[in-house]
Image (cartoon, grey):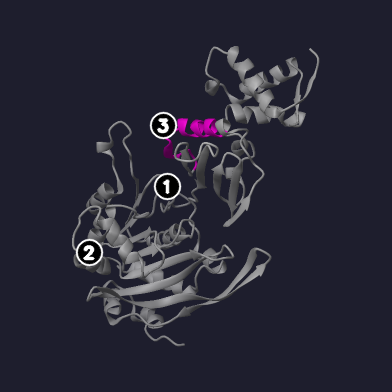
Amino acid sequence: MAETSNRPYAQILTEIQAGIAGSMTSDIAQMSETALKERIQRYITDHALRCEVPEDRLVDYVYHDMAGYSFISRDELFDRPGFEELNINSWDCIEIIVDGRREKTNYSFLSPQHAIDIHRRMFRKTGTVFDDAQPHATADIGDGIRITAAKAPIVDRDVAISSSIRKVNTQTISRDVLLDGGTLTEQMADFLVLCAMHGVSMCISGETGSGKTTIAGCLLAKASKTLRTFTIEEGSREWDFVRRDPSTGKVINSVVHTRTYPNKDNPALDIDQEALVKDSLRFDPDIIAPGEIRGREAFEVMGVSNTGHTVVTTTHSNGTLDTPERIVTLAKKAFDMSDTTLFTMVARAFPILVHMETGADRRRRVTEIREVTGYRDGQIQSTLLFEFAVEDNIYDGDDCLEVRGAFRQLTGISTELQKRLLKKGARRSELEPYINVRE
């Protein structure tokens, strides 16, 4: 057959797909990578196919468009060092976040329909429906990869698809890494550990990707060495605090990791965070750690904290001053109680509030640590203990090179918090740096 040249890749792909599928008696998805690539190569050779894709890469391109996730699996984007998230704004507008920095890419799906087909393939792996009847879906597609996607008509027809594909980091970041990276100071880190180890619950707030789960994980990794820890996560597992003796392989600490379980056949049988928070009390925990409170489980989380259990959790809010209202709003989804009752509960449940932010330089920092002292006259009473004060932002063109600022300790902890820490076993010497504060 005469050689075919200068044909668009999309046209070549369509021909190969039709040619191979027409000669097969089984599903392509059941074929091994090696077998399918051999069949693709044979078809290309027999039909002398050529296009703008280099000849030595054409088989790989076709394979990943037929059976993989197109350029996503072909170029192993999830395994790229520092990969955090792939943001598909539309079929032909794709961004990647690596080490906290967002950048545009030259990647594009071949067409709007191609983008939808690849996303359906991702969801099919988990049995998640993603079609015109259900144009929005969330799923874990393996190895800590979580995808949320929306297709037309939720997004415009010419956009076709929008999705966020995030890699969950299951490795606990060490305290030293956080200190070296300027996330917080040694004194701030020691204070948060002191609270977690001695019965003081806390809620860590921040926007998506600000590092709140990382900070919580660092604290819980330390606490779980000696305290029985019960974790609750929704979707992917991000925490792993089980420690084993390197010589025997036996577990040497006491950790129970749990995840929610949505029942696709009968939603009434869903096991959600609210149910797991209730169950956690039956496991004799020292620390209960819901990964993130985002719904009606907020009421149960406040409840277990107010029964004497230590809670370390996260939520979305604009700052420590906004966090109590955020939790109360979520708790009202379960019980529409008076504001006075709920704000009093949240003040007692979370004596310490922490806020994370991503600066203009894309570095994540603890920007606030606040002590909540009560609720009076319709207002949360609190004191800002630590803050990161921004002095200036240094730019090179549109890129912020540096956020200039300083961490500051503003005031000491209350007498009530001192008593609470001492009753839970803290040493007086451990409290001293947080009582006598020097300017």
Q: Secondary structure at mark 1?
A: loop
Extent of the magenta region: 115-143
Q: Dot 2, how many residues are within 10 Å of its Cα: few (below 14), some (14-19), or many (20+)? A: many
- Foreground of the two, 78 or 189: 78
Closer to the chain start, of discs 2 and 1, is 1
Q: At which x and y percent is residue 136?
A: 42, 38
Residue type, numbered disc 2: Leu
Q: Residue 286, can we see it? A: no
Q: Which label sits on residue 342? A: 2
Q: At which x and y percent is residue 103?
A: 62, 52
Residue in view at x 25 percent, y 61 percent: 302
Q: Secondary structure at mark 2?
A: helix
Residue type, numbered disc 1: Arg
| Nearest-to-viewer mark from 1 and 3 | 3
Residue in view at x 58 percent, y 23 percent: 32
In the picture of the structure, the residue carrying the numbered disc 1 is 237
Left or right, 154 with respect to 9, comes to left
Q: Residue 376, can we see it? A: yes
**127 magenta-colored:** yes
Residue 17 found in image quarter: top right
Closer to the chain start, of discs 1 and 3, is 3
In the picture of the structure, the residue carrying the numbered disc 3 is 129
